[in-house]
Amino acid sequence: MLPPKAYVIGTLVVFMLYIVGFCIQNTELIFLSKQEQTIHWSQKVTEKTIELEHCERKLLLNSGKKRKMGLNVLTPWLAPIIWDGIYDIKILDNQHNGTRIGLFVFAVKKYIRFLRPFLESAERYFMVGHKVTYYVFTEKVNEVVKPKVADGRILQIHNVVADQRWQDVSMRRMEALTIFTKEHMPNEIDYLLCADVDMVFNDHVGVEILGDLVATLHPGFFLSEPESFPYERRPISAAYIPYEHGDFYYMAALYGGKVEEIYKLSVACQKGIMEDKKNYIEAVWQEESHLNRYLLYNKPTKILSPEYLWDANLTNGEFIKKKRFLAVQKDHQEVRN
Ligand code: 4YA
Ligand code: UDP
Ligand code: MN
């Protein structure tokens, strides 16, 4: 048996070694003030959440030979790609106190039927608690039944010509944007989002999507190789993108940014559309092709994951936890005639 004195000294030495070990491992804890500790640890938690969500998405990929770029949270030029869990909405909502946001949408001919569900779902999920102006374009201004909008939200209905071909209706949006982002919107809003009307908001879509120039990954191609992106590949078109170029394929059903940025974007795309018309050519996916060309050389400052554009018929839905903006099922032939 050890004498009692040696036993006490032994215990003391072990205890002191434990304290020294703890201090070495936690130097940052000991030397930080209380406030700094809070920031430090909450940052760590956020980083871990991002890392976990990120790993989870990447793990899902291990089975196949799919491209991982579309699942990242940063582009090669360091723009964030917005996925669930990578932002703190309370902080962002505070930063955007007073921000005025526009939502631009065409509801021409038969697509007028999509307007009500679109607006009603927007009232429920789109920028709730912020200042919103809806810019609706239709040839049936007087027929629109205006749904009630919440306080701080405004519904504007504007007249637009109804082109005969659906492709022209879709492209006409760029022309309307060049006019409105120059003349009306600069005094009314700070940011503008442009959307298809055959969609419904199905979950939170808030200020996390605001940025100088924002585009959404096409939900059908976010795991594809750039060679198979449906860019316009004919050099004669103003929307031409050669095979060796391009990092993402964006969908024209949701994009946005500061009003001034959307002015520049729409002027460039409209110019491309008119150039193509002069050459008797139409880009393979109309204004979406021109949008992709513009965004290849004018990189978006923020990218939205396919959470922000989804269609229930698509594959790879397991990567998308929250389907925030969903395509309404439609008979393409019927609505376009
Ligand atoms: C639109 O997507 C709609 O017309 C469809 O009904 C659907 O909602 C879709 O968006 C999500 O190539 C490799 C599989 C790809 C399947 C999805 C194809 C179409 O892709 C085109 C570009 C255009 O972006 C069409 O607008 C898009 O179809
Ligand atoms: N659009 C419209 N009337 C039409 C055709 C198109 O208002 O006759 C508008 C509408 O906002 C629609 C968008 O143009 O959502 C793009 O067309 P569509 O949704 O048919 O394209 P898709 O998403 O099927 O590629
Ligand atoms: Mn659509």
Image: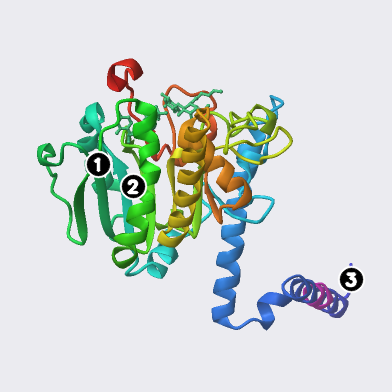
Camera-nearest residue between 186 and 79 = 186
Tell me the chief SS of the magenta region: helix
Position of 171 relative to 152 (above/below):
above
Q: Which mark is residue 285?
A: none
**Based on the displayed image, in which of its 4 quarters is residue 170 positioned?**
top left
Instruction: Give the residues drawn in magenta, as a range.
Output: 12-17
Q: Which mark is residue 2?
A: 3
* Mark 2 residue element: helix
Rendered location of residue 186, percent (x, y): 34, 65
Rendered location of residue 234, percent (x, y): 63, 29
| Residue 15 within the magenta-colored segment of the rendering | yes
Q: Are marks 2 and 1 in contact (CB under 8 Å)?
A: yes
Task: Quickly name the residue at label 2.
Answer: 176
Q: Residues within 10 Å of mark 3 (few under 14, many from 20)?
A: few
- For the point 27% across and 57% down, the residue is 132
- For the point 51% across and 35% down, the residue is 276
The span from disc 2 to disc 1 (Cα, nearest Å) is: 8 Å
Q: Residues within 10 Å of mark 1 (few under 14, many from 20)?
A: some
Camera-nearest residue between 226 and 74 = 226
* Image quarter where ligand 3 lies: top left
* Mark 3 residue element: loop
- For the point 25% across and 37% down, the residue is 161
Rendered location of residue 314, percent (x, y): 48, 24
Residue type marked 1? Val
The span from disc 1 to disc 3 (Cα, nearest Å) is: 96 Å
* Mark 1 residue element: loop
- For the point 33% across and 23% down, the residue is 329
Task: Quickly name the residue at label 1.
Answer: 160
